[in-house]
Amino acid sequence: MADSQRAVTGATIELDDLTKRYPGSRQPAVDSVNMEIAAGETVILVGPSGCGKSTTLRMINRLIEPSSGRIRIDGEDVTDIDPVRLRRRIGYAIQSSGLFPHMTVAENIAQVPKMTGWPKARIKERVEEMLDLVGLDPREFHARYPRQLSGGQQQRVGVARALAADPPVLLMDEPFGAVDPITRDHLQDELIRLQHELHKTIVFVTHDFDEAIKLGDRIAVLREQSHIAQFDTPEAILTNPSDDFVSGFVGAGAALKRLNLTRVRDVGIEDVPTVTMDDPLQEIFNKLRERGGNELLLLDRQRRPYKWLRRGDLMRAKGSLARAGTLVSHHVTRDATLRDALEAVLTDSAGRVPVTGRRGEYVGVVDMETLLNSVHELLEADRMAALEHRHDLEESRAHQTQEQLESGFAGGDQP
């Protein structure tokens, strides 16, 4: 289904002069924040440590009570309603996942639907649906406890729990900050895929500008007290930062950071010959001969990329594929950025990387040539945009000069 045809299930959020003052502090922690967030939009709050971004986020679901100002969700002023009832309508995911250690995965996910009075049959169905949505097999993970999960799996369950009651708004406070870089990339891709399907309204806090570029429809760059330095699209902030503070936060290599704006699904994904663990060796030989290539991709029994097989590997297989071929060391999802894909391809001697779906199943391959062509297109677009911007500035200066001259003549200053 095309994006334009997908139903938006998010809600609008309006922050009106939202302020937080703590007793004994001379200055407010958050000072008069005004922001409008569209339904179905992902907005990233990014800024230096201590700038008030997490405080701003937590005031939206009133985990921190505002000192003054208003919060409206879909036009409804939620500042004065019961905060517990409000929180049941807003998903919330945090860095440590926040799972209850004494509850199973299923019990954790079922918490909010249970508290809001859902029937047992509906809760059970929803738990399985949520596990499948975040890429975890319900049969395998339903009865596990958080201690039996990896950090990445815990975060997936945390997101599933936050979405279980189908809230229109999802608040995320540095949810991927405590996991390793590879797992973090995969979780970011998972969130992009989920948002591509669900179209919730997401407000996401991070201190990592690369993460902000990768995930956000718009980014709010915050100074101290959550004063907004710039609130715009990633492209606009990268190409036209509003001032030196924003430029410093963007950092060096803005052109390369733009690689985080394009997804693998937006470029050419090629297909390569594949075989499975259960295929007889003779059939594998025949397929390689028919395709006329020198390489096959071996898939495991879940159709996930497993090994690259070359003709010589098959000659040495001696009736078994157990020791033949080269293990697939990297893969990317369709929602991975070009930067992720380029890093993966650069580590591969053959210059290609498998692309996988939700459960890690094989989708295709993206190669170095495709990625470099996309990089060249981005750089050319940047060059043309810079030339156009320079031309607009020159025209503006010429216009101002002409106006000054005409103003001087009108005042009788001509010789």
Image (cartoon, rainbow, N blue to C red):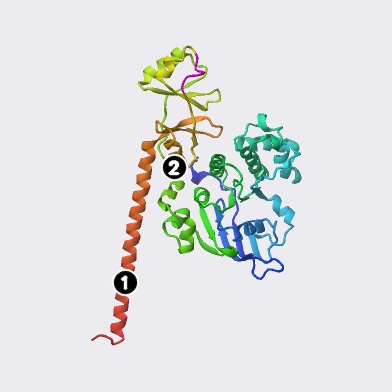
Q: Earlier in the sequence, mark 2 or mark 1?
A: 2
Q: Residue shown at 71%/69% (left/top)? A: 24
Q: Residue shown at 60%/64% (left/top)? A: 225
Q: Quick check: 318 left or right of 389?
A: right
Q: Which residues are magenta?
A: 320-325
Any part of residue 380 in sight: yes
How crowded pointer 2 is (Cα within 10 Å; few <14, some 14-19, many 20+) is rated as: many
| Residue closest to the eye, 202 or 93 | 93
* 361 up-or-down from 412: above or below: above
Any part of residue 105 in sight: no
Q: Quick check: 312 left or right of 183?
A: left
Q: Quadrant of residue 181?
A: top right
Q: Residue shown at 43%/19% (left/top)? A: 313
**Dot 2 lies on which element?**
helix
Between tags 2 and 1, which lies in front? 2
Residue 283 position, x and y percent, is 44, 14
Residue 320 position, x and y percent, is 50, 14
For label 2, the residue is 338
* 134 up-or-down from 234: above or below: above
Do callouts 2 and 1 mark residues in contact (Cβ within 8 Å)? no
Dot 1 amino acid type: His
Residue 328 position, x and y percent, is 48, 29
Q: Quadrant of residue 131?
A: top right
Q: Is residue 181 covered in magenta?
A: no
Dot 2 amino acid type: Leu
Q: Quick check: 413 left or right of 33?
A: left
How crowded pointer 1 is (Cα within 10 Å; few <14, some 14-19, many 20+) is rated as: few
Residue 227 position, x and y percent, is 56, 65
Alpha carbons under labels 2 and 1: distance apart: 41 Å
The number of numbered discs placed on residues in the rendered structure image is: 2
For label 1, the residue is 399
Magenta span: chief secondary structure? loop
